[in-house]
């Protein structure tokens, strides 16, 4: 992209750092924060372009975040592969439909979904404590189905989907939220890459801003992972839900006019 200013370079690096930090800390919120930051803070005015660009950046950052999580034994690779294997099918189907919809309407619908997820997390009292992977046969089918559904939503909205993946993993397996956050990086990276490829083929990926987001995200991701293991799980879950809810309200306000546009 030509004409990028130094202030945009700085803001893109800062935005990438915030995105990486959220991915490392709460295993989600990457694309939730990445898209509005790129549009409203950096000044990138194409919603579909922002979605495609940030999907690639979030996918790369999530892949890099697997390393510090794995070093702390917070990643269940078997579970992550199972969830992602059906999820990528949903991503492809969802991205096809998402590309057909006007960008601001996508963001508006996305904000409504985030509010529902945040409320569900706040009201949920379930706490998983097992460190292992003990999915029963019937739960395995539910886990595969959840991967397909979450993948569809990830592709449709052009997001990594960590804020949906973490609750799905804790609901349909016995791992706790800390391991779910680490394991979710596998799905976030695969979902982000597949979405980015689909958007790239339509000309909606800006490599310059992707690289800036990745550089900032590397630093932010390692910092987030460091602080994650030092925060109680109950507090972590509340922080996770509040971030989702606040960003959703902002996006709802910024895109409500899309309902009346033709």
Image (cartoon, rainbow, N blue to C red):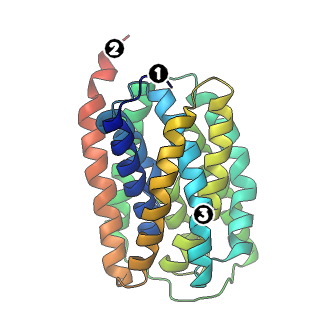
Tell me the residue that label 3 is attached to. 64
Helix, strand or loop at label 2? It is loop
Of circles 3 and 2, the one toward us is 3
Helix, strand or loop at label 1? It is loop
Residue 153 percent location from the top left of the image: 56, 44
Residue 170 percent location from the top left of the image: 53, 73
Assess whether mark 2 and mark 1 are in contact (beta carbons under 8 angstroms): yes
Q: Residue at x 49, y 66 (%)?
A: 167
Please indicate whether residue 59 sits to the left or right of residue 137 in the image.
left
Where is residue 120, by image quadrant? bottom left
**Dot 1, crowdedness within 10 Å: few (<14), some or many (≥20)?**
some
Of circles 3 and 1, the one toward us is 3
Q: Residue at x 30, y 58 (%)?
A: 243
Helix, strand or loop at label 3? It is helix
Please indicate whether residue 32 sits to the left or right of residue 85 in the image.
left
Assess whether mark 1 and mark 3 are in contact (beta carbons under 8 angstroms): no
**Dot 3, crowdedness within 10 Å: few (<14), some or many (≥20)?**
many
Q: Residue at x 62, y 39 (%)?
A: 196
Residue 244 percent location from the top left of the image: 34, 55
Tell me the residue that label 1 is attached to. 102
Looking at the image, is 3 positioned above or below residue 261?
below
Disc with the residue nearer the chain's start (3 vs 1): 3
Where is residue 171, by image quadrant? bottom right
Tell me the residue that label 2 is attached to. 261
Q: Residue at x 29, y 38 (%)?
A: 41
């Amino acid at each position: 992209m030509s004409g990028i200013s130094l202030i945009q370079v700085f803001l893109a690096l800062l935005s990438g750092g915030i995105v990486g930090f959220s991915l490392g800390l709460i295993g989600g919120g990457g694309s939730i924060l990445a898209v509005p930051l790129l549009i409203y803070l950096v000044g990138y005015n194409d919603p579909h372009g922002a979605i495609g660009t940030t999907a690639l950046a979030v996918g790369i950052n999530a892949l890099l975040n697997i390393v510090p999580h794995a070093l702390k034994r917070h990643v269940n690779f078997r579970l992550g592969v199972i969830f992602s294997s059906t999820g990528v099918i949903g991503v492809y189907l969802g991205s096809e439909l998402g590309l057909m919809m006007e960008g601001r309407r996508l963001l508006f619908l996305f904000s409504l979904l985030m509010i529902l997820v945040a409320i569900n997390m706040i009201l949920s009292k379930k706490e998983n404590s097992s460190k292992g992977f003990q999915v029963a046969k019937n739960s395995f089918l539910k886990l595969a189905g959840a991967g397909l559904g979450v993948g569809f939503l990830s592709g449709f909205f052009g997001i990594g989907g960590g804020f949906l993946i973490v609750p799905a993993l804790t609901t349909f397996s016995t791992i706790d939220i800390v391991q779910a956050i680490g394991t979710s990086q596998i799905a976030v990276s695969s979902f982000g890459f597949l979405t980015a490829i689909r958007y790239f083929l339509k000309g909606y990926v800006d490599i310059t801003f992707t690289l800036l987001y990745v550089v900032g995200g590397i630093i932010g991701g390692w910092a987030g992972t460091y602080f994650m293991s030092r925060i109680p799980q109950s507090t972590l879950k509340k922080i996770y839900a509040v971030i989702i809810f606040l960003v959703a309200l902002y996006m709802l306000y910024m895109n409500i006019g899309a309902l009346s546009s033709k």
